[in-house]
Amino acid sequence: MVLLELKNVSKNFGGLQALNNVSFHVKQGEVFGLIGPNGSGKTTLFNCINQFFPVSNGQIEFMGKSILKLKPYHICRLGIARTFQIVKPLSRMTVLENIIASTFCHTRKMDQARHEAEEILHFCGLSVYKDQLSKGLPIGGRKRLEIARALATKPKLLLLDETAAGLNPSELEEAILLIQKIKENGVTILVVEHIMRFILTISDRIHAISFGQTIAQGAPDEVINDQKVINAYLGEQYAGA
C-alpha cells in the first residue's frame, strides 16, 4: 500500500526554484531514504509535506488523499510527524513532560497522556533522564527526545531530518537500533541523512536529489553506485572505495 505520494512537486522562493518536479512514493511499513548534497532541497521537501511551505506546483497525497489544503497541525493529527535538524526541546520542562506535551495531539486526559509518555520514554531509552530538564541532555539524548516527542503523536509516517548528525559511533549504533524498532512497530519512516552507513543500514529504498531534482531512485546499492549520484554527492573517491 502506498502511504505517501509526491507527484511533480515544485517549490519556488521568488526566482529560486528549490524543488523541480520531484516525484516518489513511500510504501506502508518501509524505511525510505532521501539523500543529496547540502542545499539540494531535502528539508524543503519535508516542509512541503508538512505544509510549513505551500507547494508551487504538484500534488502530495497521504493515504490516497491530498493534504495540500491542510494546516501543519491537521497533518500531524492525520498521522504525519517529524523531527528537525536543529533540536529544540521545551527546555524548562523535564524529559517526561516534553513527551507528555506531544501526547495531547490525540488525548485530553492527563492520566492517559502520562501513561503513554512513560511507555515511549522507555521505548526510546530515555528512562534515566525522566525527571531531568531537557535543556541539560547531551546531543544523543536530545536527538532521542526529538524522536520520542514525534512518536507521542501516534504517527503512521515519521519524517526524520538528520537524526544521526552529531552522534558518536556508539550513539549511532543505538540510533540504528531505535529506527529498526520503530519500523518493527509498524511506523513508516522517511529519513534524510548524510551519514551513508546509517542510511544504507536502515533504508529499504533511496531517492537522491540534487539542485531540487531527482537524479536516482531505487534499492540502496543501485543508488549509491549510480554515476549521477557519485558525481553530484558521493564523489569518485567513494566510488573507488
Image (cartoon, rainbow, N blue to C red):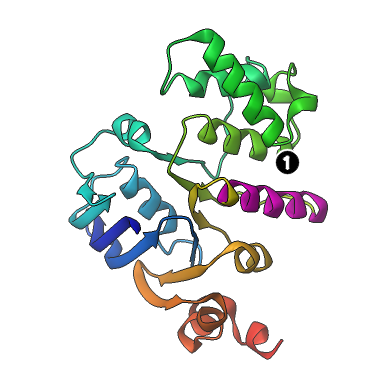
What residue is at 41 percent from the left and 23 percent from the top? Answer: 106
Compared across the picture, whether 238 is left or right of 149 comes to right
Please report the residue visible at 77 percent of the width from the left and 49 percent of the height from the top: 171
Residue 13 visible in the current orientation:
no
Q: Is residue 224 above or below residue 154?
A: below
Magenta highlight on residue 179: yes
Segment tinted magenta in the rendering = 169-183
Q: Position of residue 113 (x, y in %)?
A: 53, 16
Question: Which is more toward the observer, 157 or 56?
Answer: 157
Q: Quadrant of the C terminus?
A: bottom right
- Measured along the vertical axis of the image, is residue 35 above or below residue 103? below
At mark 1, the secondary structure is helix
Residue drawn at point x = 62 percent, y = 69 percent: 200
In the image shown, does 231 or 35 lie closer to the viewer? 35
In the picture, measured across the screen, residue 17 lies left or right of residue 142, that is left
**Farthest residue toward the top?**
110
Q: Is residue 66 left or right of residue 173?
A: left
Where does residue 58 sit, x and y in percent of width and height? Answer: 19, 59
User: Viewer-proximal residue, 212 or 133?
Assistant: 133
Q: Amino acid at mark 1?
A: Gly
Q: Is residue 18 left or right of residue 69?
A: right
Q: Which class describes the residues within 10 Å of circle 1: few (<14), some (14-19), or many (20+)?
A: many
Q: Which residue is mark 1?
A: 140
